[in-house]
Amino acid sequence: MGDSGRRLRMVMLALAIAVSLCAGRLVQLQGFDSSALAATSASQLTRTLPLLPSRGDITDRNGEVLAATEPAVAITADPVHTAPHAAEITTVLLKYLELDRTKTMAALTKPNTRFVYVAKKVPAATYTKIAAELTDLDLYGIFRESDPIRTYPAGAVGSNIVGFVGADGQGLAGLEYGRNTELAGVEGKEVYESAPNGSKIPLGSSVVTPATNGVNYQLTLDSELQWVAQRRLAAQVTESKADTGTAIVMNVKTGEVLAMANYPTFDSNKPGKADAEDRGNRAVSAAYEPGSVEKVLTMAALMDSGVAKPDTKVLVPGRVSSGGGYIKDYFSHGDLQLRLRGVVSKSSNIGTVLLARQGDKATLHDYLARFGLGAKTGIELPGEAAGHLPGPDMKDYTRDQISFGQGLSVTAIQEAAAISGIINGGVYHQPTILKSASDSTGASVPLDRAAPRRVVSAETSAKVRDVMEAVVVNDSTHKLAIDRYRTGGKTGTAERVNSSCGCYRGYTVSYVGFAPADNPEIMTYVVVDNPRAGDTGSGVAGPVYHDVMEFALSRYSVLPSTRKAPEKPIEW
């Protein structure tokens, strides 16, 4: 090594080896691994920011907002930048937000991460103030991402229909759940080049895929009528010491649901404060035995099939044998000479059974199925039940029972739609809660609609209205008559199945009515479950029907009847 020539040769050899290694590495980087390395570099310098769509609005038929989205953000932090100034940043945040100081400090100083959430659902205006103050103080490391707030301006009005969303913005009940995909829209994204600190490079490449905002839905619901129905139903359920109640108001000519009240109910803004069973919609999900309201369907089937007419005479004894036992009426009596009209007016179970026995069991079943029993109506609400309709080969005693509303089960929307179709000239409209839909540009979005179908003849429809009007005309108390209008109606009182004992205990009471009797426009159906103060449809459900119907007729400017209801014989 003392020889300078040798030293020079050794240095040159080392340099040659180093250059060879560098050249080899260069060949590897540029010749063999260039694509992979370029991709890795790009991924490290490229960030993807999700662009959240705006969730669609839900409004009532008059444009009143029932569900909307307000701009809000989730505040995030990069602890690498916030840790040195965590105390100062926390002080700023606490000026505008209700946060726990200890937890906030822990988030801002969290080790081994560059991303933490500090707060969610912060109004955009509030974040703007926070960001401005942090900028003035030259404090860096706080960021934001879209985190909109879902609001329900009407609170509890229509809440069982509208539903609510969870913390992640996904629908959990009602239309918010049933139409979640359409309401949510499609998420977009922005892909951009970023500096090592995460900031966007001003002149770097940026590709934006816009979000598609959700569909807006206008309901058939009338929020004012809905409010009246909910308040009146709540008062009556409370007064009668009942478990629950349901009220449905329908446009007979279109199948549009104008009001659908449930009690108990909840506030869509505060769903967690209500019991789980009250956050659903009993009008579509709760099946029950309808009681004497079902006689309307039975008589429609008998008259349309030619078995009977409104004036058909029936000798009604005090009881009738059925299935090893006896069927009785709610009132004691000897032999009664009633017409079919009188059987319905007096709500005679015995008379109904005797008339139903004159027809064929399979025919009765087919008519009830045609009216929509035993199947979902298809209304645009989640959780709809189908109820239960015995088959055409039912036992004789089963036929007897279902003729007057026991031994089968329905939902309130099923029964309301069936009766609406029968009195609407015999034309059934699938019940609907959606009036229209539009995208974010205002363009109409098509809705699936089942075509109207005929269920009975126009002549039969008129006969059924005749029979139902007789119920109101012959009501000795006249409490359910509505001034200036001819109306038709029917009470219902059914023994109630109690799941705890597997037996009948208590009652489910109801009342259905419509006006005007000669040309129906609006129908209201009220069901009250397990009242302990009162046990008749007329006494418990009837008053709710009367008050809601009176308001609806006035609100929709339905012209009063010009002729008095004719008095037709109910006996012979």
Image (spheres, rainbow, N blue to C red):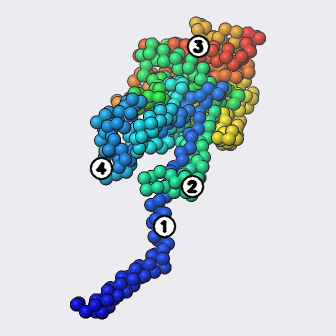
Q: Earlier in the sequence, mark 3 or mark 2?
A: 2
Q: Is residue 432 above or below residue 189?
A: above
| Labelled disc at residue 111 | 4
Mark 4 residue crowding within 10 angstroms, few (<14) / some (14–19) / many (20+): few
Residue 331 visible from this viewpoint: yes
For marks 1 and 2, the one nearer the N-term is 1
Task: Please give the residue where the numbered disc 1 appears in the rendered image.
Answer: 39
- What is the C-alpha distance between the residues marked 3 and 2? 68 Å
How far separated are the C-alphas under marks 3 and 4?
A: 65 Å
Identify the residue under disc 3: 547
Q: Under tag 1, what secondary structure?
A: helix
Q: Tell me if mark 1 has few (under 14), some (14-19) or many (20+) residues whose alpha carbon lies within 10 angstroms of its own.
A: few
The amino acid on which the numbered mark 2 sits, given as a three-letter code, is: Leu
Q: Secondary structure at mark 3?
A: helix
Residue at x 49% of width, y 55% of height:
194
Where residue 178 is drawn, which disc sits there? Answer: none
Whether tag 3 and tag 4 are in contact, CB under 8 A, the answer is: no
Of labels 1 and 4, earlier in sequence is 1
Between 314 and 173, which is closer to the camera in this rendering? Answer: 173
Q: Identify the mark at residue 203; answer none if there is no mark.
A: 2
